[in-house]
Image: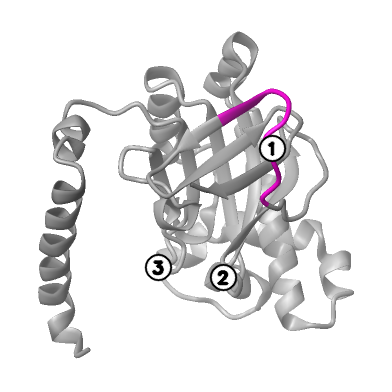
């Protein structure tokens, strides 16, 4: 598709999607317009390959979203802070999910010594700090792709530490059991791994489509449901 045709195609695709959804469920858009009550706050990367609602198999209205370059969570970023406060205090989401991903351009830039240029060098400073804090470990990884994955995971861990120090999040954890999850999206497989950090300090790794046992929160979409377990496990099941 020619670049100049991309926007025209997107508008046409929207018309087809809206028509299909309205035909499938005539109440879908009127209900959506009446208000939102998402269960998940998703904090992710702006990368075009990581569309949260799509990769979670959920629907519009299910996920409140904030994305930026390299999913950096900075305590001094008022944009991120405003999203967190609104989602946690006013929407009262049940889960805060911070997600890093493979093939991250920000991670690759932080590992290198060259400047990207402009404001991007300032924005990536926290990721550079992660690199410096884990220099020995990162330099011991000889495979470039694995090193980039590792710094992306460490960036999620650093972000989770910031989230757990956030006053709104601390209050919500204490008062109503808000859960905070550190995750990682593998673009090459389409799978999300729970890194086992945050409030659910279970074992990291990919969690399969196991049955639902014990206490859990379920977010249902039209085609799948995302299950968050109180023991730190999570899974997605097709409907």
Which quadrant, please, contains the N terminus?
bottom left
- Which residue is pictured at 41% across the width and 28% down the height? 87
Q: Is residue 151 left or right of residue 163?
A: right
Q: Is residue 186 left or right of residue 196?
A: left
Label 3 crowding class (10 Å Cα cut-off): few <14, some 14-19, many 20+?
A: few
Q: How many marks do you count on the picture?
A: 3
Q: Is residue 116 above or below residue 57?
A: below
- Left or right: residue 168 compared with residue 111: left
In the rendered view, tell whether residue 41 sits above or below residue 22. Answer: above
Q: Residue 169 versus residue 56: which sits nearer the camera? A: 56
Mark sitting on residue 161: 1
Q: Nearer the viewer, residue 120 or 54?
A: 54
Residue at numbered disc 3: 48
Residue 187, placed above or below residue 23: below
Residue drawn at x 20%, y 86% as measured from the top left: 3
Q: Earlier in the sequence, mark 1 or mark 3?
A: 3
Local crowd size for mark 2, using a 10 Å CA cut-off: few (<14), some (14–19), many (≥20)? some
Q: CA distance from mark 2 to mark 1?
A: 24 Å
Residue that numbered label 2 is attached to: 187
Is residue 196 inside the magenta stretch?
Answer: no
Indicate which disc, 3 or 2, sits on the residue closer to the N terminus.
3
Report if the CB atoms under discs 1 and 3 are less than 8 Å apart.
no
């Amino acid at each position: 598709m020619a670049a100049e045709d991309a926007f025209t195609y997107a508008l046409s695709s929207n018309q087809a999607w809206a028509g299909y959804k309205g035909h499938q469920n005539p109440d879908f858009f009127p209900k959506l317009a009446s208000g939102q009550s998402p269960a998940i706050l998703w904090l992710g990367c702006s990368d075009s390959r990581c569309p949260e609602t799509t990769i979670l198999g959920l629907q519009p209205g299910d996920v409140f979203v904030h994305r930026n370059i390299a999913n950096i969570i900075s305590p001094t970023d008022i944009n991120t802070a405003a999203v967190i406060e609104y989602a946690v205090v006013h929407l009262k989401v049940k889960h805060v999910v911070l997600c890093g991903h493979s093939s991250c351009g920000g991670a690759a830039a932080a590992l290198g010594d060259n400047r990207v240029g402009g404001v991007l060098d300032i924005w990536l400073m926290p990721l550079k700090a992660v690199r410096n804090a884990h220099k020995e470990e990162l330099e011991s990884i000889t495979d470039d792709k694995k090193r980039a994955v590792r710094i992306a995971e460490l960036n999620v861990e650093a972000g989770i530490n910031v989230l757990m120090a956030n006053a709104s999040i601390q209050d919500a954890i204490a008062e109503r059991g808000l859960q905070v999850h550190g995750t990682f999206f593998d673009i090459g497989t389409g799978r999300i791994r729970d890194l086992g950090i945050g409030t659910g300090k279970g074992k990291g790794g990919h969690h399969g489509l196991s049955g639902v046992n014990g206490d859990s929160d379920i977010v249902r979409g039209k085609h799948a449901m995302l299950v968050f377990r109180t023991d730190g496990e999570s899974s997605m099941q097709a409907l």
